[in-house]
Every structure is written in structure tokens, then in C-alpha cells.
Amino acid sequence: MDRASGSNNGHPSTVTPQVLPLDAANGVAILDPIEGSRFEIYTNPTADLTDAAPSKFHFPVDTAVQIDANEFTVPVTANFLVRDETGQLITDCADREVVNLPKNEYHIELTGAPMKLYVAVDSAVRLIEENDAVVIDAQQSPCYLGVRSFHEKPAGTIDVPDTPSGLMDGVSLLGSALKTLSPERSFPTLRGHPPLLNPASEFSKPSAISSPDTDVQIVVPTERQYIYGAASLAYYLGAELIPGKHPRIITSGEEFELSRSRFHQDVNETLEQLLFFDCVARTEGYYQVNLYERNQLESSLELEYAALYEQPLSERTAAFLDVDRAKISDYIPEWDLTADIDPTYTNVQALPFLANNLSFIRVAGDTQDEPEAREAPDDISDLLRTTSDHQKGTEQAGHEPGIFTPEETESVEHVHIGDGYPLGSSKATIETFYRRLDQPELPDDSIRVQVVCNDEQMRAEDAVELIYGDRELLDFDITVHYNLTCSELRAVLSSTTDFLHYIGHVDDEGIRCTDGVLDVQDVDEVRVDAFLLNACRSYSQGMELINSGALGGIVTLGDISNMPAISVGRTLARLLNQGFPLRAALLVAKEHSLSGYQYLVVGDGRLQLAQCIYGLPWTVDVEDIRADQYELFVRTYAVKGYGVGSLMSPDFDTGGERYLRPGTSKQFSIDETELQELLDEGNHPVQYDGSLYWSNDIDDGSSVQIRSQD
């Protein structure tokens, strides 16, 4: 459904994607060893491959091959953009099932795959969308396939001392990673990962890292809370931080005040406004798409986008900031991520990672409000996943040491970096940020999932074995273990595992086994990448897994009853299997469980168990049903390569419009036929009337029906 575009450019890696012939079908497998991703394209006739020059393509690619075939089937309803040999956009396929083009040289950009794909042809070509696939039918061969990985790594490390000038100088260099200063940098893959910041006694930087010439300055007070809070904005603007009592932006000879008392809110709203207008202005460049947000504002704003597109960044910035925010606030999409960060010197290391996601940054205060005590929502006679009788239904998460309620945010996702465990948010660590960069290259074999059920009364949840791996194009190796001893569980934790789904009991001493308790601290080597510890109060053991080398996981902060835990466990398994990252999967699952508030993501919340074949994972929220009309929203969630500034086009009639993503769309009104076509595209979550359904269960032969009760 969600045809996402993360857009162009990237710089080649020392490890490049591979294009190999398929054994079991006519076509090619595209392997990205950097991201551990795999994608297939089917050909007619059988594909004979030879290497080709990357310069064959208008945009940069890491790998290029010549394919002696002239018909390609891309097995997702991907969007496609067609350009001529100069890069001029010829056509956009939104809401068009068939496109016929006369003989010419064309560069076809495909979206929705876990890597960037281009097909180059010199022929008349017919583009067809049918049966959840896109067919490229060229009259002549050979054709060419270009591939670029979404992977990005920092260009180097900057040493920063714990002084105002040292911290400002380091943050001022985050924008050195920008690949362009044009409005196209609003695309996620045109920004580049900022250089790392390392605490040190003296300032030092690699000679290759230098600030871009943007002529933009951000004036901030010399305290860490202001310097840290400005990091994402400084990165996006390629701006220099300079000290001053009164915060403001200086650009193109103009000054724009930032309130000292609400500094973080002003900075974040400024970042939001600037990126939004860049997304609109870039429709005058390489991506001249029919953008919904531009259409809505065209008559009310006196902005010459064609002229603004050509202006230097500083002049565009001034023009965009001159616009009253109230005029555009209804059309700015939800922001992806808000990060609360403790302003310790060590946490300067988190800033490049937060800026890379264009996170809203809020510097945490010295105190947090105590959370309201919550009564156990489930019958206390229900089996609790704890082994201590005195804990059952008495102590709640809000009373645990170090657990607090963070200030609410309007962004899609929320993360905390610092001490304590945030109720309703996620907890990230500096170590997992760095592990994200150091992930080893993954072979093109199966995704290994281990399910451990250490309590006979909880066996109902082991049905997740049937959920993991229910995907085409991906190979899963799933092992289920029952009633493990301490030594057996230690062996599981020490074996190479992509995802561990644990079902059982955890207490203050560790993970309960048949012959005692295993404390993760006593495991010499943890080789689990991601995990779900679906047990009461599992957060301490989850953090031990993170501290021992795991990348990310889901834990609980308090007591959970068995039946809700089974429901959450199964829902998370289905979401993770469909390509939802840990944090987004938990967001969806929590909305439909009374115990959901007890669950927490620790480590890297963007970690995915499996790739999402549609680019951005999505849910359909059906709001109302009247006769044959369904009022609904589409919610999309950010993943690598498809962050803030991406595009999407739903697979129903939108008049050819594209929309900015991720986040919640405007409300659409579609008929039953369009809804059924939408639901037929794979197995996706559908939210209606407080319940969560799956699209495979909603059809004429199902016991689950979404129909009007009128």
C-alpha cells in the first residue's frame, strides 16, 4: 500500500550490494550485505548478467549490471518515477495502472524496496501495476539495473572538550555531512550521517571534515541544555553555533528570535517549518511530483517556489521563517521522533545520532513528575508472570526505583537518553547507538529466531512460532525451546540469534529456569541481537542483555497478567514479522492492551527483525463507516532510508497526489471496493473501534467483518 520514496544520492561503501541470478525462478536476487537485506526481481526471459559501469545511471549507484532481458516484475506495488537521460522527470505513476512511453532513453526509479533501485532502458516501455506488482515491459534489451544501499556511516570523529566553545564547535560541524544544500536535503538519504562527537581534553577534527558554507548562525547561551537542544537544527541548516545571551537565528542579514524560556520548543518548531517548506520547494527540482501539501497552500501563501528553489540556503531560510507558522500548522505532518536527553557531558556522543534522524531534542530537567499509581487492570486471580506472591497486583511500575513519567510529546515516537526508565517512552543508550554502526555484515542466509517457553501454563504464546517467518522473499530459521535449565538457556543466549522471544518468569535474581535462576550478568558472551522478554519486571535483565552486546529489545516495567501478555506477545510477533521496528511495533501493540503501558523498548528502537517490503510500515485506522464509505487514516512509521521528509502515495484514488511521511495522513474517504483492494495487499494491521485486526482476516469469508452497523 504505502509506496514510499526516501530519495536520492548516497556515497559508495567499501562493501557493495550484489546482484545474483535466482536458482528457482527467472530473475535476480539483490543482496545488501551492509544492511542484511534481500530483494528479488523476476525477469523474462532468464536473466544473463554482466557487470556495467555505475556511470550508466543519472544518480549514483553502488552496483550496476547489464541484464539481457526486457521484462521485469517487481513483486511489490512500488511507486515508479521515470526520467529522461538528463534527469528531467517524465512521469509519476501515482494513481496510474498503465503508462506507455515511446522509444527513448529512460531511467526508472523504483521505491518500496529495502535498497534504492534504478532500471535504465533505451526503448519504448510499458509500465503496468497489477497483482501487487509492477511490470516493466521494454521492447528492446539489454536493460540495466542499478542498486544503492541505504547504509550511511559517519565520515570521522571530532574530539570535543567539556567547554562551551568546544561543544559549540563540535555541534557546528554536524552539517558537514549534508550531501547538498538544496531543498532536496529534506530527503533522508541526502543528509548523510553527521560525524561522531567524542569527549576529549582538547578539540580535534579530521582535516576532511569542514563546515558547509551556508552563512547561517544560531546564537545560543553557553549552557549545555541550549547547545544540545540546537543540534538537529544546526545539522539541517549546516549552521554555526555562536555564544550569546539571547537565542536567535541569523541568516541572510535577518535575525529570528528564539525564546529562552521555551527554547527547545522554538528550535523544534523552526526545524519542522524549514524542512516542511524544503519538501514543498523541492517539487521544483528533480522531484516535480503532485504534492498534497503544496496544493493545499498554493493559494494562501505568496511564495515563488521556483525562485526559492534556486536561492542559496540562507535566503531560502529567511523567506521560510518569514511565514506565519499558523498558516501552515494544519499541513505539517507529525514529526517522527522526540528525544529527551540528560545534559551530561558524556551524552554529547548521542547528538550525531539524534541529529541524523532530525529528532526533536528536549534537554531533560533535574526532576521528573512522579507517575500516578495505576491499579492492575486485570483480575489479580489471573496468572501473573512473576514468581513472588507478594508482588502480585500490589506494586505497580510507578513505584519501582528509577521509573518515571516523562513529559508528553506529539511526535510519533519518544525516546529517553539518560538515567532511569521512562514509563510510556523508550530508553536508548550510547552503546547501542555505536553498535548500530558496528553491526557486522550479514550473510544472505535465514533470520534466526529462538522462542523460549519456560512455563507450561504459558504455552499458548508459543504459537508465535507460526507467525515468525510467514513472509515471502525472507527465510526464517525458527527454533522453539521448552523448560530450559540454566545451562541450556545460557547456551541459547550465547548462540548467534537475530531475535529471542522469551515466555516465562523473571524476578530480581534473574530469568527463571527449571533448575534455578540465570542472571544475564553471569553469561560470558551474549550473541542475541534483539529480544522480547515477555515476563513481569524484566527490565533489569533486558538492560543486562543490552550491556552485554544486544542491540535492542522489549521489556516490562511491572507485573503483567498472562492473557494480556500472550496477546501482546502475539501482536508484537506479527508486527515485527511485517517489518515494523521495535519501537513502532510496541506503539501499535500498546494501544490495544490494558497492560501495554508496562512495556518498554531498550536500546535501538529502530532495529528491524525483517525488512518491510513497502518501504514504510503502515497501519490503517478506520474512523467511521457510513453506508459504503469508509473514513480512514493511514499511519506510517519511519525506518532506515525512509525517515522525515519521505513521500508516500496510498493505493486508492487520490487524484495522483503524494503526501509527506512518516506520520498520520489526512482523513480519506474510500468505498468498500477500494478498501478491500487496500487490504488485499499483504497482511497489515487495521485498527477499528478500539480493536486491532489484520487485513488477511478481513474478507468475505472471514468471521471478522468491518462493516457498518447502521
Image (cartoon, grey):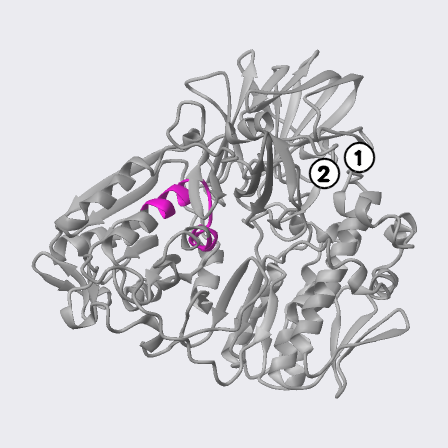
Residue 461 position by quadrant: top left
Asked if the residue at tag 1 contacts the one at tag 2, i.e. Cβ–Cβ closer than 8 Å, the answer is yes
Residue 156 position by quadrant: bottom right
- Is 288 above or below relative to 652? below
Q: What crowding class fits label 2: few (fewer than 14 Cα within 10 Å), some (14-19), or many (20 or more)?
A: some
Residue drawn at (51%, 75%) of the image: 347
Q: Amino acid at mark 2?
A: Phe
Instruction: Using the image as rendered, state which of residue 257 and residue 394 is in the foreground.
Output: 394
Outermost residue, bottom side: 245
Q: Is residue 499 left or right of residue 270?
A: left
Find disc 2 in the rendering and name its residue.
59
Find disc 1 in the rendering and name its residue.
87
Image position, residue 307 (x, y; %): 92, 51
Image position, residue 592 (x, y; %): 41, 51
Q: Is residue 163 left or right of residue 509?
A: right
> Disc 2 or 1, which lies upstream in sequence?
2
Query: Is any part of residue 5 visible from this angle?
Result: no
Q: Amino acid at mark 1?
A: Gly
Is 581 colored magenta in this rendering?
Answer: yes
Label 1's element? loop
Q: Which residues are magenta?
A: 570-587
Give the alpha-carbon distance from disc 2 to disc 1, as whole Å: 8 Å
Query: Is any part of residue 221 visible from this angle?
Result: yes
Label 2's element? loop
- Is 58 above or below relative to 236? above
Q: What crowding class fits label 1: few (fewer than 14 Cα within 10 Å), some (14-19), or many (20 or more)?
A: some
Image position, residue 517 (x, y; %): 14, 64
Residue drawn at (59%, 29%) of the image: 628
Image position, residue 91 (x, y; %): 77, 28
Which secondary structure dominates the residues rendered in magenta? helix
| Number of residue marks | 2
